Image (tube, coloured by chain):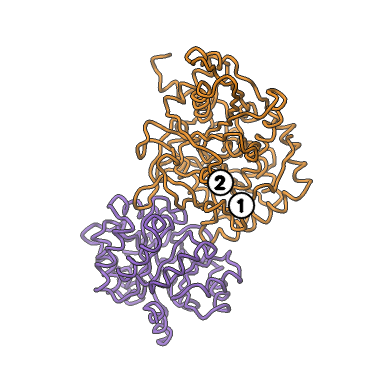
Amino acid sequence: MTAPSFGRRDPDSRGYFGEYGGRFVPETLVAPVEELEEAYREARRDPAFSADLEALLRHYVGRPTPVYEATRLRAALEAGAGSGGVARIFLKREDLAHTGAHKINNALGQALLAVRMGKRRVVAETGAGQHGVATATACALLGLACEVYMGADDMRRQALNVYRMRLLGATVSQVDSGSRTLKDAINEAMRDWVTNVGDTYYLLGSVLGPHPYPLMVREFQSVIGREARTQMGELAGRAPDVVVACVGGGSNALGIFDGFVEDGDVRLVGVEAGGEALVAGRHAARFATGVAGVLQGTRSYLLQDLDGNIEPTHSVSAGLDYAAVGPEHAWLRDLGRAEYASASDEEALGAFRLLARTEGILPALESAHAVSHACRLAPELGSEHIIAVNLSGRGDKDVDAIREREPAEG
Amino acid sequence: MSRLERTFETLRRRGRHGLVTFTTAGDPDLERSAEILQVLDRAGVDVLEVGVPFSDPLADGPVIQRASERALRAGATLARVLDLVAEVRPDISAGIVLFTYANPVVRMGTTEFVERAAAAGVDGVLALDLPIEEADRFRDATLGAGIDPIFLLSPTTTDARIRRAAELGRGFLYGISRLGVTGARSAIADGAETLVGRIRRATDLPVALGFGISRPEHVAEVGRWADAAVVGSALIDVIARAAPSSVLGDVERYVRWLRGDVDTPEGRAASVGAGEQ
């Protein structure tokens, strides 16, 4: 179940999922993204590539990651529930993957592709730092030079991950332009790539950017859904009724959705960052207030002002703090195949504490958004139902930021 | 025949190479950027590229990024840039080409954008992140409104794509002399002449060459192969360094120096530092 499975549900030949996606890049990047697409199509047809990736996922990453039923979390929710009871909650433990998040699945897949393409240097962007750490790890393992761009604000919020990347041999470059977060790190990584296209591979961390990135990243993450589908059958005897995942760019969500998207009766729910309030500049819930537009190579929903400039965003979790969402999510939403909700900063922090105390698991603040929404759904659904939550990462990186917010708790 | 076509035809007939400038609309503020366009025109610039500031200018280097930030702070938006063009157009004989990222146009709506741009007197539009594969509707709309769609060609552009851009474009083609983002350099990239040669073999459309041009000798060198040289970041740097009271004079002296009209200490002073970033 850890073996890759490629070539299902491709976008059209121009990289569109419905009316979203495409390839909106400056002219200099057209040839490199075409080269990348060709290399990727060839790699995914090659059994040797799949075998190399599967071996790394199994022996290096520790896949399959477990699925765990959160019975004490459910019991805690039962206290406040009505007579219908509370749905069972299962957690897909991507937090137990090497480097502590799902990001390693994609980083290793693309780093293998970079080696195959003869590139010697990798650039990447990072928000929370999890993709940066995963990329630095994959580059250390495969002997590639690695430079990670990170917004100045995120470097402050995620100082531990900055140090981890440096320990892994990567150069971390601070980005001071724009809002100094993930969006600006992507701009800077693309500027680096456009300048050094000859020897440099751009290892994008989410289902964003120009075609083929949204397809490629989803396919490298689809191992999550494939495993979860089998594991749910073993543990619960059937597929879940609802699958819940947080959505920044949306790669962990598409990864787990992929295992269930063809089961029409499984509800797929993405949870965006509701931030402080659903007011411009104070959240990152693109589907709540966004409008379709073009940013960083792709057409999707964007938080933008009336003049088409990108609005600032806010979330307590750096990994969800981004103004656009992966184009396939926009398409799934238009189709009605997936639905999108949001959880506020406070709700995510509440879910973080609850999961820590009931289950002994510190989730990443990103993943805590999904846990929060599952806790909202479970009493609504009742005890006959089953929810699967993608616990996309571990929360060690967030401990400092949480402690800073709550000085009184000591 | 469009104004841009006439401009380049006249240059060719006279055996002269042209000068194209890029400035960001709204930098340092809307009023002064309008005056700067008028000064550039008076100083003999053939085509004025007018940049629409955008929050995420991923194809631009630090100099134009900063200009974009100054312009946004000064309240420049696509709508206001179009108003600015409409205001200065009657006083300007040079061609005016809008340089924009796709999203402001998408947000305004392509149809409304081309109507307003045509009414303002815009001669051409280049959308930096709309490569030919994504530009069908945009190209039809601009041509329909009598505006020239300008396409960008880079050293990584294949010969097949050069031919396609030449078929789809009108007015001129904009070649960029090197990989990377915008920004002044001390010398013209080696690949620049090769790119222009490849474009020449594919089409008779005029070619303006930009990226990294900051000095009169660059302009003259580029003029030996291309129809025009584009100066952007170096000019924006002159604007950024100038005192508010002297910005118009500094811009005019810099452009005259670039054109080889004058070799004055002021011209050289205005250019100090512009060659090395």
Residue at the far bottom: name it: B13
Q: Colour of chain B?
A: purple
Tell me the tag on residue A247: none
Q: Residue at x 77, y 49 (%)?
A: A46
Q: Position of residue B23 (x, y in %)?
A: 35, 63
Q: Is residue A155 visible?
A: no
Q: Position of residue A352 (x, y in %)?
A: 50, 22
Q: Quadrant of the N terminus of chain B?
A: bottom left
- A262 relative to B127 in the view: left or right: right
Q: Position of residue B238 (x, y in %)?
A: 33, 61
Estimate how packed mark 1 is, as few (under 14), some (14 to 19) or many (20 or more) residues with alpha carbons within 10 Å. some
Q: What residue sits right under mark 1 in the picture?
A: A11
Chain that appears orange: A
Residue at the far front: name it: A83
Q: Position of residue B53 (x, y in %)?
A: 36, 56
- A198 relative to A1 in the view: left or right: left
Please give the chain letter of the residue carrying mark 2. Answer: A
Relative to A3, say whether B1 is above or below: below
Q: Residue at x 66, y 37 (%)?
A: A259
Q: Amino acid at mark 2?
A: Glu
Q: Is residue B75 visible?
A: yes
Q: Are marks 2 and 1 on the same chain?
A: yes
Q: Earlier in the sequence, mark 2 or mark 1?
A: 1
Q: Residue at x 46, y 53 (%)?
A: A294
Tell me the tag on residue A328: 2
Residue A103 in which image quadrant: top right
Q: Nearer the viewer, residue A406 or A5?
A: A5
